[in-house]
Image (spheres, helix red, strand yellow):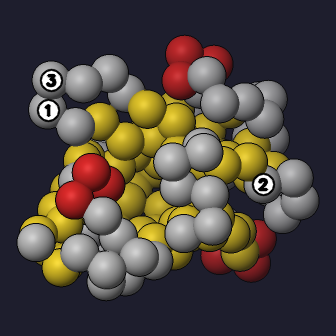
């Protein structure tokens, strides 16, 4: 069983930056970030192996978001720059035994953290 705890959400103006953290109680193979806006399906944002290589990004965030991992403290980060109104959502981190963008292939989920981008 892996427990995941996200932090770092909040309110930011469009064009601003925010950094999310996800502390894991253990390691699987890969970590991912997903988001869900009200009335929308859960959407893939980014994923990375615990080795720190092969990051993947959704097209909607490519070039603006960066996923990274710190093995020393079992924490995965999501640096979000140039935030847009449409980035507003609850952001979840998740752990999987495969590197994938498919939400139902993730076995463990955090509780989520709200990110709100204002105009």
Q: Position of residue 112 (x, y in %)?
A: 29, 47
Q: Is residue 97 left or right of residue 4?
A: right
Residue 19 vs 39, above or below: the answer is: below
Which of the two labelled residues, at mark 1 and mark 2, occupies the earlier sequence position?
1
Structural distance between the alpha carbons of marks 1 and 2: 27 Å
The quadrant holding residue 20 is: bottom left
Q: State which quarter of the image contains the C terminus.
A: bottom left
Q: Residue at x 51, y 48 (%)?
A: 60
Q: Label 2: which residue?
A: 55
Q: Label 1: which residue?
A: 38
User: Tags 2 and 3 in contact by the CB under 8 Å rule?
Assistant: no
Structural distance between the alpha carbons of marks 2 and 3: 28 Å
- Residue situated furthest top in the rendering: 104
Res 66 seen here:
yes
- Quick one: SS at disc 2? loop
Q: Residue at x 62, y 57 (%)?
A: 62
Q: Is residue 101 left or right of residue 119?
A: right
Q: Residue at x 53, y 55 (%)?
A: 61
Disc 2: CA contacts within 10 A as few (<14), some (14-19) or many (>=20): some
Disc 1: CA contacts within 10 A as few (<14), some (14-19) or many (>=20): few
The quadrant holding residue 76 is: bottom right
Q: Residue at x 65, y 30 (%)?
A: 101
Q: Position of residue 39 (x, y in %)?
A: 15, 23
Q: State which quarter of the image contains the N terminus.
A: top right
User: Tags 3 and 1 in contact by the CB under 8 Å rule?
Assistant: yes
Q: Label 3: which residue?
A: 39
- Quick one: SS at disc 1? loop
Which of the two labelled residues, at mark 2 and mark 3, occupies the earlier sequence position?
3
Q: Position of residue 86 (x, y in %)?
A: 27, 51
């Amino acid at each position: 069983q892996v427990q995941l705890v996200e932090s770092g959400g909040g309110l930011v103006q469009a064009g601003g930056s925010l950094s999310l953290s996800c502390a894991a109680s253990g390691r699987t193979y890969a970590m991912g970030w997903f988001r869900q806006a009200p009335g929308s399906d859960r959407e893939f944002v980014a994923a990375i192996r615990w080795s720190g290589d092969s990051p993947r990004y959704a097209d909607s965030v490519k070039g603006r978001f960066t996923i990274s991992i710190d093995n020393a403290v079992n924490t995965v980060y999501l640096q979000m720059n140039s935030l847009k109104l449409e980035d507003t959502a609850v952001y979840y981190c998740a752990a999987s035994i495969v590197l994938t963008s498919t939400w139902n292939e993730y076995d463990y989920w955090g509780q989520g953290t709200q990110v709100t981008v204002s105009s």
